[in-house]
Amino acid sequence: MSNARKRSYRCPKTIKVVRKIVILIFVFTYSTSFAQQIDTADERFKVNHLEFHEECIKTYHVKSMSASNRTKKDGQPLKLGHEYYNWVFDINGLLVQEAHTEADIMTNVSDTIKNIMRYDREQKLTYQTQLVGHKIKTIHYSYNFEGKLVETNMRERLNYGHNPPFIQRIDSFSYQQLSDSTLLKLIFNEDGTNYREQQYIYDDQKRIIEKKGRYLRGDIQTKETYKYNPQGYLIEKIVYQDVKKNLSEKYVFSYDKMGNINKVKTYRDDINKRNIDFIYFDDTLLLKAIIDQDVESHELNILRFEYEFYDKSSSDHN
């Protein structure tokens, strides 16, 4: 088994510095790969995690990263928080395990959500397990020869007892290319009933600019729109959970000169709710901290990161 040690590293300029990030800690989704193709993110468990660029993780042999939070209310000193995060990567730079622990200071009891992922030879997600308290949820992903997701098989049960009852849900997917810029995704339940559809609209650079969803029962319609800067980085995402109600959540992204995301502003119905800053180490491209500020209360939630690396004799990034 390889030993591991903590250290810093620098991503070379030949590697795209903009990281593929899915940050559900702050209830928004950003993924550079999602702009290029239909991702499995729609069907993945919604668990708090950061997901970095696999090539960068692989090149510098990142084994794990962890974070703990601190909080600060207006006019009060910084306090140690009660949330802990951990992400584990394989040697290919793929996220294989993540955990989020939150301690209740009143009861001195901790709750942990643990998520485990497995991939195929093409590095597509094929299996996922989530442990929450006494419940265990598993989901299997199947793909067609084009690499598109065609089925998810989810099973949820209690994590104790002999042959506990379980809930199972199987969804299947088919695709229709409506035009050069529009792809329709049809979603079916285990009975073969088409209950939902999603439409993906791309620009001439194959970046997604709009995603429209519709539940066929109840006719609930959703919509997401995307805007990019001249460098191709996502700068705005607007989410409508119900188009008829016209209630929106907007996320505005900004970047530093190196292309690292350094700020996200979130809006609800055009009112600025949160400002999220990303801080990096001065001499590396490692994320040092995330500062999440509630605009109205000025309360801060700060995540500080630590790293552990596979010990590789071929690497000299100390």
Image (spheres, helix red, strand yellow):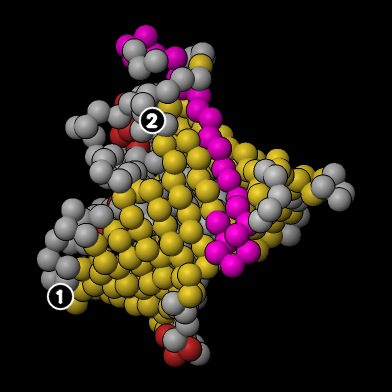
Secondary structure state at the residue bearing disc 1: strand
The answer, for residue 260, to whether it is visible in the render is yes
Query: In this view of the protein, which residue sits in the foreground, 172 or 200?
Result: 200
Identify the residue position indicated by label 1 in the image.
Answer: 179
Residue at image coords 18%, 53%: 231
The numbered mark at residue 282 is 2
Query: In this view of the protein, which residue sits in the foreground, 226 or 212?
Result: 226
Looking at the rendering, the stretch of residues picked out in magenta corresponds to: 293-315
Residue at image coords 38%, 77%: 223
Residue at image coords 31%, 50%: 255
Magenta-drawn stretch contains 301: yes
Secondary structure state at the residue bearing disc 2: loop
Residue furthest top in the image:
313
Query: In this view of the protein, which residue sits in the foreground, 108 or 218?
Result: 108
Taking 32 as reference, is 219 above or below it?
Answer: below
Instruction: Report crowding for label 1: few under 14, some 14 to 19, many 20 or more residues within 10 A (C-alpha).
Output: few
Instruction: Find residue 286 and report its image quarter.
Output: top left
Residue furthest front in the image:
75
Magenta-drawn stretch contains 156: no
In the image, what residue type sits under mark 1?
Ser
Query: In this view of the protein, which residue sits in the foreground, 16 or 231?
Result: 231
Residue furthest right in the image:
107
Residue 221 at x, y percent in the picture: 42, 84
Q: Quadrant of the C terminus?
A: top left
On the picture, is 10 further left or further right than 188?
left
In the image, what residue type sits under mark 2?
Asp
Instruction: Find residue 194 and report its image quarter.
Output: bottom left
Instruction: Find residue 196 and report its image quarter.
Output: bottom left
Taking 59 as reference, is 162 above or below it?
Answer: below
